[in-house]
Image (cartoon, rainbow, N blue to C red):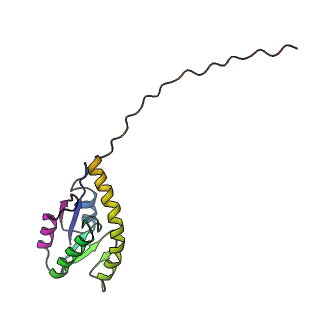
Amino acid sequence: MIGYFRVPPVRGATFDGPLAEKLTAAGCEALHHDACYALAVHKPGLEAAIASAKPGDLLVVPSLHAFAAHIVDLLQVMGKLQAAGIYLMSLSEGVDTRMPGGFFPVCAQLLQFNDQTRMVRTAEEKIVRLGRPRPKPAEAVIDEPASETVAEPPPEA
């Protein structure tokens, strides 16, 4: 089992973070990764993962989003994997091309992937454009004096 993931361009995201832990816990013996910047075409980590795999090996990804930038990219990589005899498993979506008819569940996920991609891309672009939101500084609470109420004397009878 060979693991692969892409790390988003967010300050603090590291290659040895939760995605690596998830793949290691799934039983991956080797991990490959790339930094994803928008729709990057050059992915040396993915190329190394495919080159190190033998026919019958399993490439494991945490999710389809951590694997490909968009649907066309996903289909191109899946074509490479199929031509090389390498299987694909996505942990989040439950895709496993080793199963009989394994490609058909992938196709069903492609519709959902396409919809989710727009949402993820928009969020990533906003993070890159605006930077990570900074926590607001704690504002000092100013104690205002309690309003003094003057009691009126009772009316005289």
Q: Residue at x 21, y 66 (%)?
A: 4
Magenta run includes residue 71:
no
Across and down, in percent, residue 17 comes to 25, 55
Query: Considering the image in quadrants, where does the N terminus appear?
Result: bottom left
| 89 to 25, vertically: above or below | below
Question: What's the magenta region?
Answer: 31-51
| 34 to 126, vertically: above or below | below
Across and down, in percent, residue 57 comes to 18, 77
Q: Residue at x 85, y 13 (%)?
A: 156
> Which residue sits furthest bottom?
100
| Closer to us: 73 or 134 | 73
Q: Residue at x 40, y 33 (%)?
A: 138
Query: Considering the image in quadrants, where does the C terminus appear?
Result: top right
Question: In this rendering, would 124 be left or right of 141?
Answer: left
Quarter holding residue 67? bottom left
Quarter holding residue 153? top right
| Closer to us: 37 or 102 | 37
Across and down, in percent, residue 90 comes to 29, 71
| Closer to us: 110 or 11 | 110
Across and down, in percent, residue 10 comes to 26, 51
